[in-house]
Amino acid sequence: MYKPQGAVPTEGREATAAGRGAKTIEARDVNLYYGDFHAVEGVTMTIAPNKVTALIGSSGCGKTTFLRSLNRMHELTPRARVEGHVSLDGEDIYGKGVDPVEVRRLIGMVFQQPNPFPTMSIYDNVAAGLNLNSSRVPKARKDEVVERSLRGAHLWEEVKDRLGKPGSSLSGGQQQRLCIARAIAVEPEVLLMDEPCSALDPLATLAIEDLISELKNRYTIVIVTHNMQQAARASDVTAFFNLDATGKPGHLVEVGATNQIFTNPAEKQTEDYVSGRFG
Amino acid sequence: MLLSGGAGWRRRAKDRLMTVLIGGAFLLAMIPLVSLVYEVTKRGIPGLSLEFFTEDARGQIGEGGGASHAIVGTLVITGVASLISIPIGIMGAIYLNEYGEGRLRRALTFFVDVMTGIPSIVAGLFAYALFELFLGPGIRLGVMGSVALSVLMIPIVIRSAEEVLKIVPNHLREAAYALGTPKWKTIAKVVLPTAFAGLVTGVMIAVARIIGETAPLLVTTGVVDSMNSDPFNGRMQNLAVYAYNEYRSPGVFKQAAYDKAWAAALTLIAIVMILNVAARLVYRRYKTEIR
């Protein structure tokens, strides 16, 4: 089991890192738009620390869009807009004077397609957060962060002898774990995962799910998934999104303990969805 | 029965006919290229000698003299033009692809397209007029030629670099943003390295396009017989103008002058080929698998 002690705080973040322990995200009446298209309507939910929260729902219901609004990635899409409030331990991440770059340092993300940087070695991929963000990090500390992150992502044993090889030389599942290592190397408070296993085979998926359940000891984790077994297996809390019709905005139907959502949901639509009657 | 009968022979005949037509078109396109290389090589070789590469043409009225001043001039003028054009062109492409949006972006793209179509003599006259404003009429400098060539080169660099930046997948930018990387650093450390091989190829295409320009150099760098490697001082010869001049005014020893003109043409082609091979090597060494 990974021990948080001896963690090296990222530069300039000693203060926040000292009070470590994952953080709570609160979304209040979040509305998301792409130009004129209203994609997500009125989402209010609290995402608890040290838990895995799964966002499920049929395609196009806005789960990924909502996820991307939690670390201000949504606004990178041209003409995309956000209304409402999202806060991290009470601090509004859309507040005036808040730098989106800082927000993304605290709230990391893992994507659907494994996307290691093709020009960088395995080592440099993991160290990318340090190389890209701080000016000079001593080699010894980099080595330490790389090893710690790769161990944290259950990849160290497989790659320790070929850290200089390109990241793209790994298999899909390994690449995804490399991306997770890259994300946790910058010590975020929250990890957002956008269908992290959809491009992987069942074994690699299992490896990632094991990893997720371990990472929640340290991070707040939000995972978007199309795979209901995955939500049932890997998450503690499940939020079900739906939309009334194509072209209408997606909204949050209900959120609750995963067990309850899958066995005894409050809403009829949720029951229909989790029992496989649609979607 | 189902497979053997019917109109299968018609489809096969059509397929055969199209294959022959396309192959023929390819051969037809190759004829001028092959004959050009063959002819230039055949006529250029007699003019090549050690003297051709080591001597300039200063005070030569006989058969002797070389083109070293023109070779150096071509390299210096093209080099300075590249120094001007590559940063401007690549930064322009970064603006268009990463930052620009809306009307300004569309307007700039339009003007870049227009610039690719500028006749080269116009670029030469532009550079001349520009320098004349400051340095007076009749001015001839190597760097003026470089500026003229830059006018031709910048749009080509922008165009090719933009295409290369476009194919850098967006998920790599997002991966960097998700680590809390500012935009400019994402471009400098992720986008440009990923696109590096393609950028080099684009630059080489642009260099190959301008290295043989004659008209804009005639009006900006002038004609001179002696070695000058300082682009900021005095006239400067180059291979294209040298070839043109040897042909236009061969003097008494006509054949020797013609030989030198062809040798200059051959040298120019050789330089372009060397640059191309170098670009290919760089491409192979640094190309990244982009998905």
Image: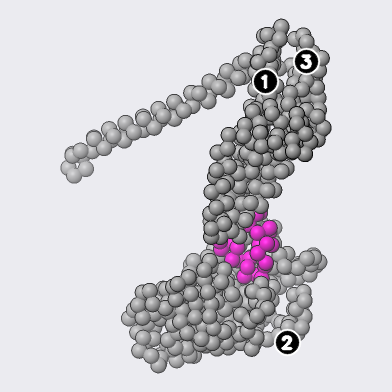
Please state which of residues A204 and B75 is positioned toward the viewer in this rendering. B75
Q: Residue at the spot x=74%, y=16% of the render?
A: B49
Residue that carries the numbered disc 1 in the rendered image: B243
Is the same chain shared between marks 1 and 2?
A: no
Question: Distance between the Cα atoms at labels 2 and 3?
Answer: 80 Å
Bounds of the magenta span?
A: B169-195
**Residue A93 falls in image quadrant:** bottom right
Identified by mark 1, the residue type is Ala
- Residue B118 visible in the snapshot: yes
Chain on which label 3 sits: B
Chain on which label 1 sits: B
Residue that carries the numbered disc 3 in the rendered image: B65
Which of the two discs, 1 and 3, labels the residue nearer the N terminus?
3
Identified by mark 2, the residue type is Gly
Q: Please, what secondary structure does the residue beneath circle 2 have? A: loop
Residue that carries the numbered disc 2 in the rendered image: A19
Q: Please, what secondary structure does the residue beneath circle 3 have? A: loop
Quadrant in the picture for the N terminus of chain A:
bottom right
Q: Residue at the spot x=58%, y=37% of the render?
A: B118
**Does the segment drawn in magenta span residue B175?**
yes
Is the same chain shared between marks 1 and 3?
A: yes
Identified by mark 3, the residue type is Gly
Q: Please, what secondary structure does the residue beneath circle 1 have? A: helix
Q: Residue at the spot x=73%, y=83% of the render?
A: A16
Image spot of residue A104 (x, y percent): 64, 74
Question: Distance between the Cα atoms at labels 1 and 3?
Answer: 14 Å
